[in-house]
Image (spheres, grey):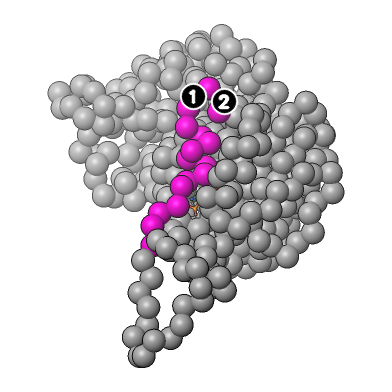
Amino acid sequence: MEKAGGKRILLIVGGGIAVYKALELVRLLRRNDHTVRVVMTEAAKHFVTPLSFASLAGTAVPETLFSPDEEARMSHIALSRDADLVVVAPATADLLARMAQGLADDLATTLLLATDKPVLVVPAMNVRMWMHPATQRNMETLRADGIAIVGPENGDMACGEYGPGRMSEPPAILAAIETKLAATSHIAHNLTEPNLSGHRVIITSGPTHEPIDPVRYIANRSSGKQGHAIAAAAAAAGAEVMLVSGPVSLPDPAGVTTRHVETAREMLTAVEDCLPASLFIAAAAVADWRPTDSAEEKIKKTGNVPPLLSLVENPDILATIGRPGPGRPRLVVGFAAETQNLLAHAQAKLERKKCDMLVANHVGRGSDVMGGDSNQVTVLTRAGAEPWPPLSKKAVAERLIAACASLLAESAR
Ligand code: CTP
């Protein structure tokens, strides 16, 4: 398990029978050298006393939102801003609903609304409450807000029912917290120059062209700007960079070995030729389908009947390279271009294509991501989703390379 050590955790404890697991979580966090501040909802205090948490955390549990002497010592804003990570465990259906609504009617929800730090929630509730469309809607909202979610697990519940809703066990929550802390420091706050010397990096970029006949092809609007910017950033970080580019009108980046390809199948072959590598970043907008047969000669108009185009699926380069096994790059990063349900689709893609990291962006009509110079992405890892602010494609590339360099350095330890 990655262990960031010495971080400040604000633990918000909701009211449910799983509160007892939160006590164990405090003990585990402290054993990993983290400082823990605990805030309890009024409902939580029905299950365990603040004194129990204060004893384990080694610091007092602030009582209410409107306590004059506590407010004088430390404002609630400071409490939420001073943390490196805010963890909500157990996160009850009610607390999650209030978070999704942006309510701030007690100390816990006020802290959650006031924080500018990453938040990780650990749901725990009855199976029916978890499955209820309202709760699922709220979870979707929280996911879209970039909140990381751990669990819930399937199992026997305190109420006698069986199904999803049981709070994850403290060691699993601890593992997710450590991963989140590590990813957060890699992704958002990496101020040191990334160093990729000694690493080979393969990057795909641009669209692919799938020929219909010698003069016509299927393509998409990708310009290759983001993939090429990533190649340049990786080269600046000292990597040996192999850029496999579809047809673009950009110059080859300096200090990079560029291989030019047309089709998805050529792109896959070129990528496989470049292996082994430490890092693979699939930034290309690969055509999902190609014409079943590409005509040898230009297709001529014959009467009034337009030709029928029959398509077959192209190989999935990212899924092929991400497949677990010997020779898999240590870090595999995908992109997800979506026109709707960005986070849900991106999360599914992360799992399906076995990526370690996925950069999701919205490419609907009116978005200028494809062809433009800026990009607003959300970066997903198994630790959760992190929305990045709108940035130039160059800045996205630099941040991404910094994040990958830290993750590679971390995985080598
Ligand atoms: N990708 C790939 N090979 C393909 C298709 C996609 O390597 N044949 C990679 C892209 O480079 C990107 C990621 O997979 O990193 C996701 O691409 P995207 O077009 O968003 O996803 P699709 O696989 O096309 O899935 P869907 O059609 O569901 O959006």
Residue at 51 percent across and 35 percent down: it is 322
Residue at 60 percent across and 52 percent down: it is 284
Near mark 1 (Cα within 10 A), the count class, few <14, some 14-19 or many ≥20, is few
Residue type indicated by callout 1: Gly
Task: Quickly name the residue at label 2.
Answer: 327
Give 35 or 188, whichever is nearer the viewer: 188
Instruction: Please tell me whether residue 149 is drawn above or below residue 144 in the rendered image.
Output: above
* Image quarter of residue 202: top right
Q: Are marks 2 and 1 in contact (CB under 8 Å)?
A: yes
Q: Tell me, yes or no, if residue 200 can be seen here.
A: yes
Residue 366 numbered tag: none
Distance Cα–Cα, label 2 vs label 1: 6 Å
Instruction: Please tell me whether residue 56 is drawn above or below residue 4 in the rendered image.
Output: above
Residue 177: x, y in percent?
53, 25
Queried whether the magenta region covers residue 320, the answer comes back as yes
Is residue 342 shown left or right of residue 267?
left
* Image quarter of residue 358: top right
Queried whether the magenta region covers residue 164, the answer comes back as no
Residue 4: x, y in percent?
64, 20
Q: Tell me, yes or no, if residue 388 can be seen here.
A: no
Instruction: Report the magenta residues as a range.
Output: 311-328
Q: Is mark 2 within 8 Å of ligand 1?
A: no
Residue 289: x, y in percent?
44, 58
Residue type indicated by callout 2: Gly
Query: Where's the N terminus, which quadrant?
Result: top right
Give 205 or 134, whichever is nearer the viewer: 205
Residue at 56 percent across and 9 percent down: it is 31
Task: Quickly name the residue at label 1.
Answer: 325
Query: Where's the C terminus, which quadrant?
Result: top right
Element under disc 1: loop
